[in-house]
Image: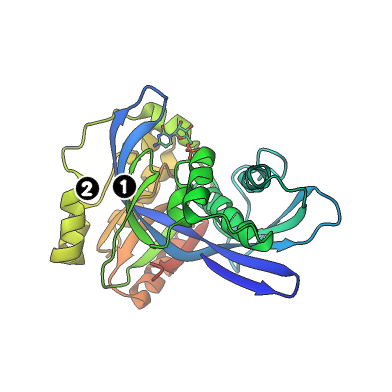
Amino acid sequence: MLCQPSAGSLTMQAPAKLNLFLRVVRRRSDGFHDLETVMTAVNLFDTLTFEPNASSEIQLRVLMAGTRNQSSRPAAPIPTGADNLVIRAAQLLKDHAGISAGVRITLIKRIPSAAGMGGGSSDAAATLAGLNRFWRLSRTQGELMDLAAQLGSDIGFFLGASSTAVCRGRGELIEPLRFPTSLYFVVARPHSGLSTPAVFKQCTPGVSARGVDEFVHSLKQQGLGHTVRLLLNDLQGPAERLNDEVRQLREHFSKLPVLGHQMTGSGTSYFGICASLQQARVIAARLRAVGVPWVQVASSCS
Ligand code: C5P
């Protein structure tokens, strides 16, 4: 997460994530699922700006960033009220600190929603970290992590210092993962999105035998060429059954010269791993040419 203070305001850049590995281990009694996942933050960002508010209200304005030749239409309207994760994060921190201050928040959305790229979670993490600084609260990283876990499973990953991590439990048990090279991606999203609970409901836990340790060992020791054979997302089958556009993306990617490809998170976004940034740009152009509505080149954050 990048933080840029300026006179009276504070701006945060909130990155998207991709799941390089996602195994659904078991269904839990609280309705969640235990996971083993490797997440990496990539250089596609939402931007949040925090400005003083004369009143004690938390106000949110959401602007959709349109990019050249790309659809910026959200799959579902983004809520700006109390059910938006940014408002919920700000309110939770405000209540926790027991302060009366308000804030005006502007959120510029570039990360597609309902796409498995963690945009809402990253915005919530940027809100906790940003307002902790903007309101001069000096809450510890541990306290912010506790608040993050109350808001959602992925939010702690975005608060953490490591841009790649193995996440277990519901996703909130985070172990930083360092490896030497940058990864280059082409990321595509179809017209429609998917609801995360609906995809989890369709999934049969515990079917994949391969665990995350083998994937991590390969990433550290055996290089990308070997590791791409171990890509896994247990939510992809269920997502394809719910949304034919995911299956169509898989078919497009299987005809392209990428090193490996799969869906991220609970979908519907899909990514290919490329040998270089240049190759990713060529592949992105091919996907746009066949009518995929949102295609971006990205690299792993350092
Ligand atoms: O925690 P988060 O709000 O991101 O989760 C959204 C939904 O996804 C949950 O309500 C649950 O249905 C599902 N989920 C799950 N197991 C996880 C994470 C999410 O079943 N580990």
Displayed quadrant of residue 257:
bottom left
Q: Is residue 159 visible?
A: yes
The Cα atoms of the two marked residues, 2 and 1, are separated by 7 Å
Q: Residue placed farthest to the right in the image?
A: 54
Residue labelled with disc 2: 212
Q: Is residue 181 above or below residue 189?
A: below
- Placement of the C terminus among the 4 image quadrants: bottom left
Relative to residue 127, is residue 153 drawn left or right? left
Where disc 2 sits, the SS reads helix
User: Which of pointers 2 and 1 lies earlier in the amino acid sequence?
Assistant: 1
The colour scheme is rainbow
Q: Is residue 190 visible?
A: no
Task: Identify which residue is drawn at 42% across, 39% down.
Answer: 244
Type of amino acid at the residue the image marks with label 1: Thr
Task: Identify which residue is drawn at 74% across, 75% down.
Answer: 7
Q: Which mark is residue 145?
A: none
